[in-house]
């Protein structure tokens, strides 16, 4: 069930365990602005650059009222290792069945080196305090993703 979510839509609910096995849900995070970012795989160059950009800009994002949550099909164990290796201060959610990834339309056809395959489409959703999508970022600047998000609010 893929969707094409856009600005103004109600964000689909989610409830998953993070890298520590702690349950994280959209309902629990309401009252905060949420940066929900979908990425293909832990420890790959683009995903590492994106995560490190969000880490490096984390204080600015926190001061602006954001909570950061990353989602990929990787396991909780993979997330914990990725988080520890790069000192990531935010939640990483394991979605191996791709339920939330598909609900947010972040799964689909991709092309690399002339081959077509199905995979996670790197996409970020900024969700308001009351659960409404404020921004959809389909073209993520992996090297300065925190800055890219902050620019939307300046």
Image (tube, rainbow, N blue to C red):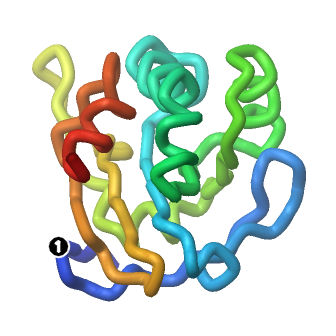
Q: How many marks?
A: 1
Q: Residues within 10 Å of mark 1 (few under 14, many from 20)?
A: some
Residue 61 lies left or right of residue 147; in this view the side is right
Q: Nearer the viewer, residue 44 or 67?
A: 67
- Vertical placement of 37 versus 99: above or below? above
Q: Quadrant of the N terminus?
A: bottom left
**At 57% across and 79% down in the image, what residue appears?**
31
Q: Nearer the viewer, residue 125 or 60?
A: 60
Residue 97, given in percent of the width and then of the height, sits at 59, 62
**At 23% across and 62% down in the image, what residue appears?**
135
Task: Indicate the secondary structure of the residue bearing disc 1.
Answer: loop
Residue 111 lies left or right of residue 79; in this view the side is left
Q: Find residue 15 and report its image quarter.
A: bottom right
Residue 82, given in percent of the width and then of the height, sits at 71, 24
Q: Nearer the viewer, residue 122 or 144?
A: 144
Residue 71 lies left or right of residue 85; in this view the side is left
Residue 102, given in percent of the width and then of the height, sits at 39, 67
**At 45% across and 86% down in the image, what residue appears?**
130
- Vertical placement of 139 versus 34: above or below? above
- Vertical placement of 38 versus 42: above or below? below
Residue 34, given in percent of the width and then of the height, sits at 48, 62
The residue wearing badge 1 is 6
**At 17% across and 73% down in the image, what residue appears?**
6
- Vertical placement of 94 versus 88: above or below? below
């Amino acid at each position: 069930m893929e969707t094409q979510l856009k600005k103004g839509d109600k964000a689909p609910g989610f409830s998953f365990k993070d890298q520590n096995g702690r349950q994280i849900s959209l309902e629990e995070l309401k009252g905060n602005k949420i940066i929900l970012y979908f990425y293909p795989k832990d420890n790959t160059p683009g995903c590492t650059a994106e995560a490190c950009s969000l880490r490096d800009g984390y204080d600015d994002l926190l001061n602006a009222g954001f909570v950061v949550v990353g989602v990929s099909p990787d396991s909780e164990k993979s997330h914990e290792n990725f988080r520890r290796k790069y000192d990531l201060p935010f939640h990483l959610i394991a979605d191996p069945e791709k339920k939330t990834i598909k609900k947010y339309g972040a799964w689909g056809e991709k092309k690399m080196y002339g081959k077509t395959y199905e995979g996670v489409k790197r996409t970020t959703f900024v969700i308001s305090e009351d659960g409404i999508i404020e921004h959809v970022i389909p073209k993520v600047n992996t090297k300065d993703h925190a800055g890219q998000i902050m620019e939307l609010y300046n």
